[in-house]
Image (cartoon, helix red, strand yellow):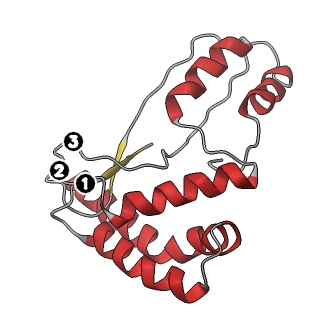
Amino acid sequence: MTGCVNDWKVYLRKCYDNLVPGGWVELQEIDLFPRSDDGTLTPEHPLLKCCQLLLEASEIFGRPYIPIPPLEELLTEIGFVDVSLRVFKWPSNPWAKDPKYKELGELHGQNMAEGLEGFCMAPLTRVHKWTPEEVNVFLIDVRKTIRDRNVHAYWPV
């Protein structure tokens, strides 16, 4: 739902109001900003610049991105009980040693690299007023970052 909900509190209230007693809701959100535990994803990486531009565009579009942790607070505030948060790490590419995460990184990296233009074209051209050519040139460096196995980035999901 990232980038699709303009008011999470209203949305979650509707979810709550439409559940029967004992019902539940499950949210699966990906954090907009990747991280690295070892500092290999530095603030100047094109991938983080891209995410920052998407964040700014989401706010201007009126569909602001919300980080994952506040969702837990909102759910509790609305009245949900037994709220639990489980965060998984999706590697940006197959840098991880664990075979499960290596495969996940391979698939996620390919998905990101192939979908990047679709994620970025409208926000960067409509909000930031870039030309399609400027977007495509910028995305070359973003894709390089995604594919760089020396960058141990992951997305919290």
What residue is pinned by disc 3? 37
| Crowd class of label 3 (few under 14; some 14 to 19; many from 20; radius 10 Å) | few
Is residue 8 rendered to the left or right of residue 43? right
Q: Residue at x 64, y 13 (%)?
A: 76
Please say if the residues under marks 2 and 3 sit with CB atoms less than 8 Å apart: no
Say what amino acid the circle numbered 1 marks: Leu
On the image, the x and y values in percent for residue 10 come to 81, 29
Which residue of the protein is positioned furthest toward the bottom in this rendering?
133
Question: In the picture, which quadrant includes the C terminus?
Answer: top left
Is 88 displayed left or right of 99 in the figure? right
Residue in front for this viewpoint, 25 or 31? 31
Residue 87 position within the rendered picture, expressed as x and y whole percent measured from the top left: 41, 34
Look at the picture and state if 84 lies above or below 114.
above
- Which residue does the image show at 72% across and 11% down from the upper left? 79
Q: Earlier in the sequence, mark 2 or mark 1?
A: 1
User: Given this view, does label 3 or label 1 mark the residue nearer the observer?
Assistant: 1
Please name the amino acid that badge 3 sits on. Asp
Q: Is residue 134 left or right of residue 141?
A: right
Label 2, on which residue? 98
Question: Can you say whether 118 is above or below 137 in the image?
Answer: above
Which element is circle 2 on?
loop
Q: CA distance from mark 2 to mark 3?
A: 16 Å
- Residue 80 at x, y percent in the picture: 68, 14
Question: Which residue does the image show at 32% across and 51% down from the upper left?
Answer: 154
Q: Position of residue 155 (x, y in %)?
A: 39, 49
How many numbered circles does the render carry? 3
Q: Is residue 29 above or below residue 20?
A: below
Name the disc covering residue 41, or none: 1
Identity of the amino acid at label 2? Asp
Give the class, few, some or many, for how many residues have Cα within 10 Å of label 2's Cα (few <14, many ≥20).
few
